[in-house]
Image (cartoon, helix red, strand yellow):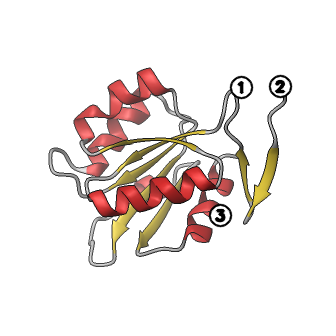
Amino acid sequence: MTTTKRTISGARARRKSSEESFRLLLVEDDDLVAAGLTTLLELEGFTVLTIDRGLAVVEAIKSFNPHVVILDLTLPDVDGIEVFRRLRKRWPDLPVVFSTGNGSSVDLTAELKRERVELLRKPYEIKELLAALQRITK
């Protein structure tokens, strides 16, 4: 069976099939945001694993092997920047989209200078997320 590839708002996505699909790890502690993003991303053809704790990221990456991570900066157990540093030590080329609320004053200057890193401020449109995913997964 072949996988259907399509371009949606500039992002390459694969339809779910018996073959490998584009895997996305969503690290988000807000249940409503996580559910909404998961639904929209699955409709776009992504396979999504959602976790709500930063300390679970390493194990999730080992078992799920995502192509990209969407990482909330404000998690209940550990700071999103610390999660990013931990995952970059083990997977330096794994693309990451930081997701944060408009009021966040986290300084990401050093992280955003790295390749394959994007920042989106909530609330954002799905087309903005898809464009960011396209940019960092080229």
The residue wearing badge 2 is 1
Q: Nearer the viewer, residue 10 or 44?
A: 44
**Which element is circle 2 on?**
loop
Q: Position of residue 96 (x, y in %)?
A: 49, 48
**Circle 1: is it few (<14), some (14-19), or many (20+) Cα within 10 Å?**
few
Q: Are marks 1 and 2 in contact (CB under 8 Å)?
A: yes
- Residue furthest out toward the top: 63
The vertical placement of 44 against 59, above or below, is below
> What's the residue at 38%, 56% (across, down)?
35
How far apart are labels 1 and 3 at the CA level? 24 Å
> What's the residue at 48%, 74% (across, down)?
124
> What's the residue at 22%, 50% (across, down)?
79
Q: Are marks 3 and 2 in contact (CB under 8 Å)?
A: no
The residue wearing badge 3 is 131
How far apart are labels 3 and 2 at the CA level? 28 Å
Please identify the quarter of the rendering in which residue 105 is found. Answer: bottom left
Q: Quadrant of the N terminus?
A: top right
The residue wearing badge 1 is 19
**Circle 3: is it few (<14), some (14-19), or many (20+) Cα within 10 Å?**
some
Closer to the chain start, of discs 1 and 3, is 1
> What's the residue at 79%, 56% (across, down)?
7
How far apart are labels 1 and 2 at the CA level? 8 Å
Residue 74 in the figure: left or right of residue 128? left
Residue 41 in the figure: left or right of residue 71? right
Q: Position of residue 20 (x, y in %)?
A: 67, 28
Please identify the quarter of the rendering in which residue 83 is found. Answer: top left
**Which element is circle 3 on?**
helix
Amino acid type shown at disc 3:
Ala
Amino acid type shown at disc 2:
Met
Q: Position of residue 126 (x, y in %)?
A: 56, 68
Give the label on residue 39, or none.
none
Q: Position of residue 50 (x, y in %)?
A: 38, 43
